[in-house]
Image: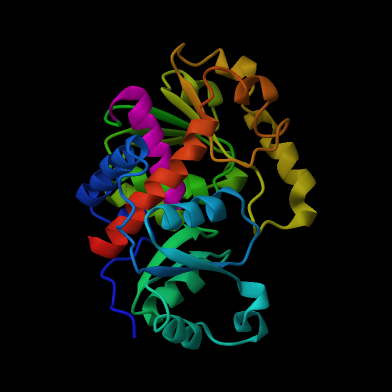
Amino acid sequence: MMESLSRNFINLHELEKANLTEILSLGEKMKANRNSFQDILDNKSFILLFDKPSTRTRISFELAISELGGSCIFLDMGTSQLGRGESIKDTAKVLSRYVDGLIIRNANHQELIEFSEHSSISIINALTNESHPCQIMADLMTLKECFGSIDDLNIAWIGDGNNVANTWIQASTLFNFKLNMAIPSEYMPSQTILDMAKQKKSNINISQNIDDVIKDANCIVTDTWFSMNDDENEKSEKIRILNQYQVNSDLLEKAPVDAIFLHCLPAHRGQEVTDDVIDCDKSLVYQQAENRLHIQKAILRHCITG
């Protein structure tokens, strides 16, 4: 049996701010000295357990583990015994005897929680329908690189109240930034997460007035309008409602001159964002994508060695 690991990485608001701050700082150090941390995961092994196609998440985690001296196996949930009805409980207990950690990308957040309840090893949330903590940590790292600090920034979220929006809300309970969100009433974030943020007195405002949301923004963030578990039959109606929330050059001109643009990719150019925005000098989407690699190295170190 593998030695039990002490830490999971599932939802940001369940973690301590001090730990997240340490992860951000370590991510920056790992980026600056990419070849200086090659033995952190020596003799450690992981399984990437995914139920959906992936580019950045899979590659960045596989590279992170390799560059830190560990090894990993990619396992498609659909082609494993999970896809043929084996229980999560049995799978989690067996895999806990094989490897040091599971990195799970799963449409069903509750299944991720079930894995964590039955595993004796570290569980890392690589994306669910509810949250995407690794992505938001990469975003926060990008903001820190650009502005020097996250404190007192104004973040403008434009578009769908999806899993990434949920995670920005979770992050707002720990970090001192203002989160202004322009989201149509039909596609609001999780009410449970909003209630949690309200209880913790987060600085959040949700509106359908896009101009008000971006007027003081240091950073404008959007994401695809279509999440992994959306109903294809509702696609045309969702586009109709969200069209006015497109981030385009006219919208960007209403923001402060030093505002930056973030998008976690993949982008549907011409829908949530136009070419002239995602390709402009204010766009840091490729720096943001690169930072997935470095911040996930820091997250792995946090889960393994504390």
Q: Nearer the viewer, residue 26 or 164?
A: 26
Question: Looking at the image, is 226 positioned above or below residue 302?
Answer: above
- Whether residue 208 appears in this view of the structure is yes
Q: Quadrant of the N terminus?
A: bottom left
Q: Residue lying farthest left?
A: 18
- Percent x, y for residue 275? 69, 24
Q: Residue at x 66, y 19 (%)?
A: 276
Magenta portion: prevailing SS class: helix
Q: Is residue 183 left or right of residue 22?
A: right
Q: Nearer the viewer, residue 99 or 242?
A: 99
* Quarter of the view holding residue 183: top right
Residue 237 falls in image quadrant: top right
- Relative to residue 153, is residue 43 depicted above or below? below
Report the label total: 0
Q: Is residue 1 above or below residue 231?
A: below
Pick the quarter of the image with the C terminus: bottom left
Taking the magenta stretch, the answer to whether it contains residue 199 is no
Q: Could one spot residue 168 in this view of the protein?
A: no
Q: Which residues are magenta?
A: 131-149
Name the side, left or right, on which 114 lies relative to 158. left
